[in-house]
Amino acid sequence: MKKLARSKNPAIYHRGERRGRRVLRLIRSSAFSAFSAVKFKDIVIPLGFPIVPKKRTETFTKDCDAISEIIGELMMITIAVVAFGLLAVIVLSYKGPADSPQADIDGWVNVGTDTVYFRHGGGELIDVKDLMIMLNLNGTSVELSPADLALIYGKPEWGLGDTIEIDALGEWGIAIGEDDYVGATIVHTGAGVVIQAGTLLGEGVVPTATATATATPTPTPTPPPTPSAPEITSVYNDAPNTASVVVNYAVNQSDAGTRVAYGTDLSLGNWSLWDNGTLVHNVTISGLIENTTYYYSVYAYNGTDPSYYSNSLIYNFTTAEAARIFTPTSAVDTSGGDATVAQVNVSGDGMYTTYNMPKFGFDDSVYQQFNFTTGLADAPLQVLLRINHTGKEVKGVKIRVWEEDTSTWHDEALTKTKTDTWLQEEVNVSTYIDSVNDLNNLVVRYESYANQDNQEAYIDYVVVDVG
């Protein structure tokens, strides 16, 4: 068998190379794009007949030249794709300038209250942290920063129908008059644009001074003071009567709860009603026994924590002895009239004595006499004689009081009557009825006279009040 001889014609290599170039051009024109994926294993180069290289080294060299051009072209395409991708990322990531907020703002001035108003009339919500307002107040330029507006307005966003009120007098001490000028510029600091500007009041004035509102810092809360016991001062009591007394005192805490402990011995044991809500106190203690010594102490409790309290020293007082009223034990009439004890024991009961008055002057032998036997064992502090009498034609009237210690009559004038109206009179006879003996032998006589015969006087009530 003959062996097939290998061709040494170099044109075969040239035709194979030209075919490779045509395939490459086909790939460039139709198979590749900026974002295509290329699989080298799918590329087939049909030559139509076997390639028989002349020499092994020459075949390897010719094949590498063709393939090198293909790889170079692929690398250039890859670089172009990467550059295009980077350009797209840069272009698409650019946001452009911030949008300018669109809003319709109404503004006006209340001269009476020196207040400037701005109302959001429509459009977008405006974040207060991006809002600044500049005013021209009759030539003075003032400014409210976002922080200032946040304190004044109190909301995070300014929306439809919401109004911002600016007190020019309170913020800057600037009063606004009827003829003043007020201009305003509203700025969105986030977008760096003027939302609205214009005149709110009067004719334009060039600013000559500048004032800037300063946000008022939130005050640090002061912790509540530590509770303390109230201090009690100025303790004293009014003069007690037979059944009650008023205890007076002061404390240094107006919200303190206070009351008085009292009793007939040092253990006290009784409490008054609470007396609260003031610094000066006047507490009445009732239901006491006459002529009795009582002890008392004032207590005051902290209004927040009652465990903090104080009390005063222990004081004392003695209640008054009850007034002792004695009615006559017997009655005598020498006028030819009528006098009994029953007629003078009760005032206004319709019972009374009848006294026939002598004419033209007193006659000490003509009287109505009332005798008292008190049975008291102690000397009186005060003796009052009370009498109700009347007589239309009385020209003179008196009572006579017997003092046992000196065997003396003491005359006391009474008031004359001109009508039938009862006269209620009180005579203090303590100056001479001042002993137990005088009191237990007390005698009282009534005498009067008229200018005509057959005239009468009357007595409704006679008693002795011993204190």
Image (cartoon, grey):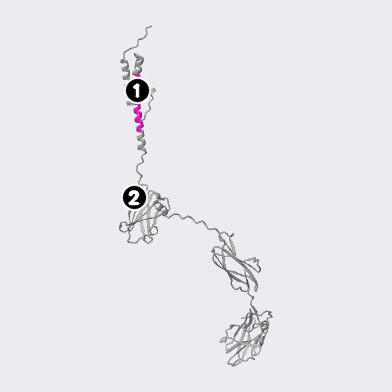
In the rendered image, residue 41, in percent from the top left (x then y), is placed at 39, 22
Return the disc, 2 or 1, that comes first in the chain's sequence: 1
The residue under label 1 is which amino acid type?
Ser
Q: Quadrant of residue 84?
A: top left
Q: Quadrant of residue 79?
A: top left
Q: Secondary structure at mark 2?
A: strand
User: Can the viewer see residue 31 in this picture?
Assistant: no
**367 sits left or right of 145 in the view:** right
Q: Residue at x 36, y 31 (%)?
A: 82
In the rendered image, residue 228, in percent from the top left (x then y), is placed at 56, 60
Q: Residue at x 35, y 31 (%)?
A: 81
The residue under label 2 is which amino acid type?
Val
Q: Nearer the viewer, residue 134 or 1?
A: 134
In the rendered image, residue 64, in percent from the top left (x then y), is placed at 35, 20
| Quarter of the image where the C terminus is located | bottom right
Q: Nearer the viewer, residue 241 or 415?
A: 241
Q: Tell me if residue 78 comes above or below residue 385 in the rendering.
A: above
| Quarter of the image where the N terminus is located | top left
C-alpha distance separating marks 2 and 1: 64 Å
Does the residue at mark 2 contact the one at mark 1 (Cβ under 8 Å)? no
- The residue under label 2 is 194
Q: Tell me if residue 370 comes above or below residue 315 in the rendering.
A: below
User: Can the viewer see residue 402 in this picture?
Assistant: yes
- The residue under label 1 is 68
Overall secondary structure of the magenta section: helix
**440 sits left or right of 97 in the view:** right
For the record, the magenta segment spans 62-84
Q: Is residue 82 magenta?
A: yes
